[in-house]
Amino acid sequence: MTIHSPERSLAAELKANVSVPFEKAAAMPKSVYTSESFLAQELEHIFAKEWLCAGRTDGLKNPGDYLTMEIAGEPVIVLRDRDGQLRALSNVCRHRMSTLLEGSGHVRSIVCPYHAWTYNLDGTLRGAPAMTLNEGFCKENVALPAIRCVDWKGWILVSLNPDAPDPEESLKDVDALVGYLDMGSYVETFREEHRWNTNWKVLGENFMESYHLPVCHSGTIGGFVSLEKMTCPEGYPAFNYHWILKKGDAPLTVAHPSNTVLTGEERVKTWLLSIYPALFITLTPGYFWYLSLHPDGPDHVKILYGGGMHPDYAGDPEAQKHFATLKALLDDVNDEDRGCTEKVYKGITGKLSAPGALSHLERPNFEFAQYISSKISG
């Protein structure tokens, strides 16, 4: 007798869901949002294997600047070492396994809060009090395990997977689309952390489609959106995207008047990039904002929310006033998204709810579901 595990059943259900032509597509099965066992598969096969965003590289400017994150239950430190190199290290002491640093900030060395074992910024052990009588202890043999960390276009990407393809290769098609904007030159001006009562995929899908803008964002940006003018092109294996053309008279959303490099639509095009699995970027010629997500149970998501300006605007004194206005708008838009995505999750848990057919404006959602299925089934 063959015994089918819940994990295999859910993976098979999702695989069947995404195996139809897009013209017949429906939203993902409810179980992939609510199941603890499916989340465990996501953590193992997606979050522990893929590249995740820890923020912007200019958020760690000086040696000793650090931030912390958790990837699939693994505590991680990201920092600048004394040579200015970006590093990621295990955030667990090699003695009695206390976590080391919290939040973000600046340190000269990494000191364990439990027994004061002290590590250099490259992870090597500098000192360990009262260890001289242990004949098996050798300080030179102790170091915090290194974790892969790269600077990709100004984004800090971290992966627990030693075999994950380099982002320069797996995301090379991003360059073909938005390379002319030089994401690496943008200057971050804010970074915040939030936690919402919804599944991480619900929030990811919400970013990927602009179908919801007229209604969900009726109090902010919804009135400026025309569904008839929206297009959702086919995406790539590692990301999907769409774009919006903005009016040329809106501050920050278009190229700075002094910019003579960008021409035509390049000056007014806003890109929405969904980098799998969990980095979502809105990129304009004047500013950017982003969300980096990590599940916190099926029913909650941890959110890194940040943004900033193109260097043309970063040095413009008038731009600071415009950006303050923009940030207030972005916060209002985020509040609207929180309300909508938390309502979706509440609806998913209802006994009478069922996934419906997708609009042609939700192609990115279908491709995202195919990506999730490929990793869980693969």
Image (cartoon, rainbow, N blue to C red):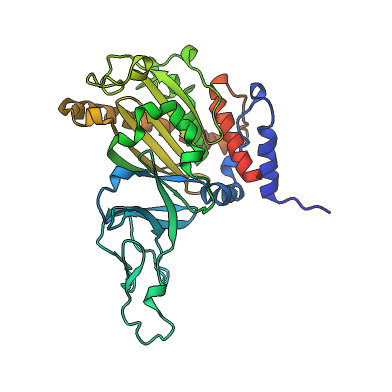
Q: Residue furthest left?
A: 317
Residue nearer the viewer, 187 or 8: 187
Q: Residue at x 35, y 28 (%)?
A: 181
Above or below: residue 142 compared with residue 122: below
Name the image quarter holding residue 22.
top right
Q: Residue furthest top?
A: 228
Query: Split into 4 quadrants, where in the image is the C terminus?
Result: top right
Res 31 seen here? no
Residue nearer the viewer, 176 or 268: 176
Res 306 seen here? yes
Above or below: residue 190 compared with residue 68: above
Above or below: residue 315 compared with residue 260: below
Q: Total number of numbered labels?
A: 0
Q: Position of residue 110 (x, y in %)?
A: 31, 64
Q: Position of residue 20 (x, y in %)?
A: 69, 28
Q: Residue at x 70, y 41 (%)?
A: 12
Q: Residue at x 31, y 79 (%)?
A: 129
User: Left or right: where does residue 157 sit relative to residue 57?
Assistant: right
Residue nearer the viewer, 104 or 82: 82
Name the image quarter holding residue 374.
top right
Above or below: residue 212 compared with residue 145: above
User: Left or right: where does residue 131 sit relative to residue 323?
Assistant: right
Name the image quarter holding residue 283.
top left
Residue nearer the viewer, 306 or 170: 170
Q: Position of residue 165 (x, y in %)?
A: 52, 45
Query: Split into 4 quadrants, where in the image is the N terminus?
Result: bottom right
Q: Position of residue 285 (x, y in %)?
A: 32, 24
Q: Residue at x 43, y 19 (%)?
A: 214
